[in-house]
Image (cartoon, rainbow, N blue to C red):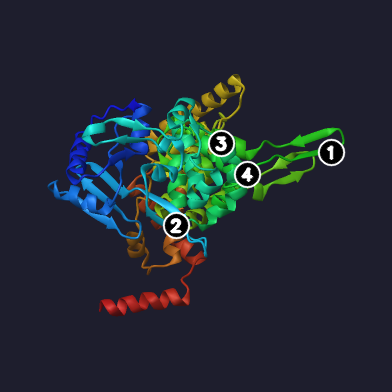
């Protein structure tokens, strides 16, 4: 029998409550796993009891001042918020089957029954918190050995474990990515056979697991498992379609392009080494997402992907809506995807300040993130080439710093706002106002006028008549303007 060092005072208190109620109680799952891996004490704790979990949770809640209890009757579980701790309590369960229907019935079971129903052996370790056996570790399925071997294996046959909850296939990828573990081959084979079953899981749960993979130290570990197990085509088809390379022979010349999926995995890992910013990592994942759509073979040139940056940027919002990711983050990711090729064009010594100002203007507050993405996009295995590219981006960063110091373009907006343009030109809200505002911005970017209010206002006065002649108000805009005047009277 192995012993487990319990130091969290809350577990002593819950164990005492279990003794008082005459109930067997065990801490299980991630709390045990992570402490054995020296990953520190978790604030979320799973407790399994032999008996009524909800009743025991109610008893525990009554013994802690300010404890908040939530009961989930459908699952016969309860969650307690006690200070910084979230404690989930469940009664040990097992599944049996009605002979005439073969439908599963969840009913009270033993500790072994409950551990059998867990996802992986490393999460099926239990530690007693009753006084008589306090700290004794129960390992019925070789979880300790699997922890040492850094192996993810299911307590039951993989098909049965994954059938109980298909999301466990994604959890395998997530744990491998978070912990640096290997998924055993039997589980991978089962995932390949059952991949389509992930479709029955809600998008919210799928996205939660995918985000956790993207937040892990090396996201490619989990992403590659999703791809190789056939899950990626259901979870994120645009990323799945990046895989593969095509070879074409013309005469004696062979033309091939790199596998964009493999390249993207390296870019995501590079980004993960540079930043914890989730959305910058998503930009790395999606920077080349439209290459399969824009791929074209051109005689004498080879494979091209013209416009993949613009097409990919347009796809981002659609992808974020489908995956139920925040749309404000989509705007930022879209901008980074759209601009990810622009900084390299600024390396040339002959590049003008206006070209630098334009990138600064378009990137705005995301300029530092854009340069981070560009650096992450360097995936050559040739150290000299990597150093050359990094030096080129150092040159770009220096140019940008010089222009920024001079022209203050990072948070640039037109010094003359729309309301003032309408007042000076006698215009109602209209497309023409936007054209005048863009003309002022363009003049600043091109260096024709300084980024100052007086210069911008004088320039507006100079150009307004010509632009008004070229872009007269539409009948609807004139009527809207007249209506606004009448209302103000």
Residues 421 and 180: in front is: 180
- Mark closer to the chain start, 3 or 4: 4
Measure the C-alpha gap from mark 2 to mark 1.
Answer: 55 Å
| First in sequence: mark 2 vs mark 1 | 1
Q: Position of residue 139 (x, y in %)?
A: 40, 33
Q: Quadrant of the C terminus?
A: bottom left
Query: Mark 2 and mark 3 in contact (Cβ < 8 Å)?
Result: no
Question: Label 3, on which residue?
Answer: 265
At horizontal 34% and vertical 62% (from top left) the residue drawn is 424
Going from N to C along the chain, the mark reached first, 3 or 2, is 3
Q: Which mark is residue 250?
A: 1
Q: Residue beneath label 2, please?
A: 463
How would you rate the neighbour count of disc 3 (Cα within 10 Å): few for under 14, some for 14-19, many for 20 or more?
A: many
Between the C-alphas of marks 1 and 3, the distance is 30 Å
Task: Give the distance between the C-alpha atoms of the residues marked 3 and 2, in whole angstroms.
Answer: 50 Å
Quadrant for the N terminus in the image:
top left
Tell me the residue that label 4 is attached to.
Answer: 242
Q: Which is nearer the eye, 304 or 356?
A: 304
**Sequence-wise first label, 2 or 4:** 4
Between tags 3 and 2, which lies in front? 3
Left or right? Give the position of 275 relative to 288. left
Q: Secondary structure at mark 3?
A: helix
On screen, residue 431 above or below 94? below
């Amino acid at each position: 029998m192995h012993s487990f060092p319990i130091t969290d005072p809350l577990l002593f208190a819950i164990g005492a409550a279990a003794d008082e109620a005459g109930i067997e109680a065990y801490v299980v799952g991630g709390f045990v796993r992570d402490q054995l891996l020296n990953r520190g004490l978790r604030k979320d704790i799973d407790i399994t009891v032999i008996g009524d979990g909800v009743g025991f949770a109610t008893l525990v809640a009554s013994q802690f001042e300010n404890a908040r209890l939530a009961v989930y009757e459908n699952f016969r579980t309860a969650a307690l918020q006690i200070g910084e701790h979230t404690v989930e309590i469940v009664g040990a369960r097992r599944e049996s089957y009605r002979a005439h229907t073969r439908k599963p019935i969840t009913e009270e079971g033993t500790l072994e029954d409950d551990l059998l129903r867990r996802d992986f052996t490393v999460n099926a370790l239990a530690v007693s918190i009753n006084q008589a056996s306090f700290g004794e570790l129960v390992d019925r399925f070789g979880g300790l050995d699997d922890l040492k071997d850094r192996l993810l294996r299911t307590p039951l046959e993989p098909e049965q474990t994954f059938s109980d909850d298909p999301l466990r296939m994604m959890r395998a990828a997530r744990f491998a990515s978070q912990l640096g573990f290997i998924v055993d081959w039997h589980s991978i084979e089962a995932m390949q056979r059952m991949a389509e079953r992930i479709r029955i899981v809600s998008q919210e749960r799928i996205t939660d697991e995918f985000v956790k993979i993207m937040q892990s130290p090396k996201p490619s570990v989990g992403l590659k498992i999703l791809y190789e197990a056939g899950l990626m085509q259901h979870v994120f088809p645009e990323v799945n379609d990046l895989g593969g390379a095509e070879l074409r022979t013309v005469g004696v010349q062979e033309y091939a392009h790199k596998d964009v999926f493999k390249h993207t995995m390296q870019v995501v890992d590079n980004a993960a080494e540079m930043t914890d910013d989730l959305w910058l990592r998503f930009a790395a994942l999606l920077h080349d997402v439209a290459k399969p759509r824009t791929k074209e073979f051109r005689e004498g040139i080879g494979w091209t992907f013209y416009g993949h940056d613009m097409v990919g940027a347009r796809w981002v919002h659609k992808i974020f809506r489908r995956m139920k990711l925040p749309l404000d983050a989509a705007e930022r990711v879209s901008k980074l995807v759209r601009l990810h090729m622009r900084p390299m064009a600024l390396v040339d010594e002959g590049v003008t300040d206006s070209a630098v100002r334009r990138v600064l203007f378009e990137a705005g507050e995301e300029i530092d993130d854009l340069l981070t993405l560009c650096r992450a996009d360097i995936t050559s295995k040739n150290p000299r080439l990597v150093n050359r590219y990094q030096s080129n981006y150092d040159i770009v960063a220096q140019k940008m710093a010089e222009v920024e110091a001079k022209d203050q373009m990072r948070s640039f907006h037109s010094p003359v706002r729309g309301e003032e343009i309408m007042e000076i030109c006698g215009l109602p809200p209209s497309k023409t106002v936007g054209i005048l505002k863009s003309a002022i911005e363009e003049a600043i970017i091109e260096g024709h006028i300084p980024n100052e209010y007086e210069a911008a206002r004088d320039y507006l006065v100079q150009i307004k008549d010509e632009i008004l002649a070229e872009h007269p108000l539409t009948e609807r805009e004139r009527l809207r303007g007249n209506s606004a005047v009448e209302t103000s009277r």
